[in-house]
Amino acid sequence: MKFLKKLKLPAWIFIGLILGILAGLCFLGNPDFTTNYIKPFGTIYINLLKFLVVPVVLTSIISGVVSMGDIKRVGSVGWKTIVYYLCTTVVAIVIGLAFASGAKALNLFPVLEVSGLEYEASSSSVMDVIVNIFPSNMWASFTDANMLQVIVIALFLGAGILMAGEKAKPFATWIDSVYAVIMKIMMMIIKITPIGVFCLMCNVVAVNGPSIVGSLFLVILVAYLAYIVHFLVCYGVSVRCLSGKKFGKFVKGIWPAMSVAFTTTSSAATLPLTIECSNDMGADPEVSGFVLPLGATINMDGTAIYQGVAAVFIATCYGIDLTIGQMAMIVMTATLASIGTAGVSGAGMIMLAMVLETVGLPVEGIALIAGVDKLFDMGRTTLNIVGDSTCALYMTKLDQKRSAKKLAKAGAAASEE
């Protein structure tokens, strides 16, 4: 019993996955029982996840935007940092979608036996999609769970708080309080994930057979291939071309932080070591002291790849073909949502639920990969902190150039006098 008490949540989720598979095998000849009496408890868990999506995204993004109020003090470094992070996130999710689409084309992902699923791909024009991002009724956006509109509302509210200054402080404080409450509720729901995974996985295996299990390892392999390509290509180009450093030396320098990130799956816990490694490689301590904590909040390249791969995998399992427009929506949603991704264990599933709802995919599909989420998390956290470090080096170089120009101008003005 003492051993069981020491197990952490990821271990319990994995146990729930294994027990769900075993129970599903026991009911292979009687899937109606699991569908009628076991799956409903998993549906309750999914409903609770969906219930949290809007408040988590709304409050976390507002809090994230408000916390960036100090960007005015660091001037151009702050805005360039945000642009850098968002650009690498877009590249990451495009890579994730490309690898997942390739795996689908090779028939590596399965199609489940799903009853009662009604789905119809939307065929809106690009301009319709852009227009529909901006809400005409704030409350309707909340009740309809239109996540892109919720993100836009959150960004406007956060910007409004910053612009209102002192008068908006009570509202900002209230938002922070609501955010803290929502985080506690989220952790309560995340704790019952093992039960939800057990119930849903039991029904999936009972209906579809044990072949679905092998597909989990394939989707993990696809995600890690995408992680590696993004690491070598995107970060390799950044370090060599933007920061002017050798990529081999960079990998050697950041390796201690990568090792800690891989084992702890926490960007926050790795942050002190990430700062130390970046400074040892030449990052300005003042720059890294701002860029790296900000990156721990808004730079989610690994998470973006995970969401792209997971979305295509879940869509394939349900026999759904994503359109180019829907993939573009995934890119947009995941990129904007990275600003407000909560830095707590299990938050990735909440963000994935948001992405799935945005393109109309069944949120129940989360159960297919929740049991092995820890394996995804190890790679995506490592990728996240490496991206933070590359940004710190690049921003240091830009800041040094800006300082050199100022000194040159000051010297020229002094010589003229």
Image (cartoon, rainbow, N blue to C red):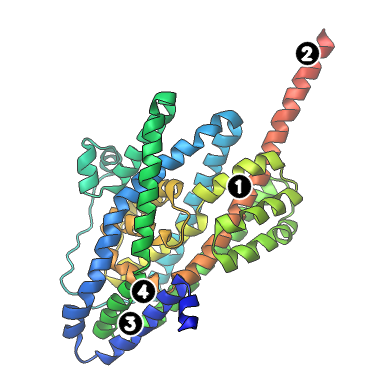
Q: State if disc 1 and disc 4 touch (CB < 8 Å).
A: no
Q: Are marks 4 and 3 in contact (CB under 8 Å)?
A: no
> Residue 368 location in percent, x, y?
35, 73
The residue that label 2 is drawn on is 413
Of tags 1 and 2, which is closer to the observer? 1
Which residue in the structure is indicated by mark 1? 292
Q: Which residue is located at x 30 percent, y 90 percent?
A: 25
Q: What amino acid is labelled 4 in the image?
A: Pro
Per the rendering, the mark at residue 194 is: 4
Circle nearer the N terminus (4, 3): 3
Taking the image as shown, residue 260 lies to the left or right of residue 216, namely right
Give the image quarter of residue 121.
bottom left
Residue tagged 3? 20
Query: Who's the residue at 23% across and 73% down the image?
Result: 41
Relative vertical location of residue 379 with respect to residue 325 in this rendering, above or below: below
The residues tagged by marks 4 and 1 sit, at their Cα atoms, a distance apart of 33 Å
The image position of residue 369, as x and y in percent, is 38, 71
Q: Measure the alpha-carbon separation of dots 3 and 1.
A: 40 Å
Q: Which of marks 4 and 1 is nearer the N terminus?
A: 4
Q: In what element is the residue under mark 4?
A: helix
Q: Going 46% across and 76% down the picture, which residue do you hit?
A: 11
- Quarter of the image for the N terminus: give it: bottom left
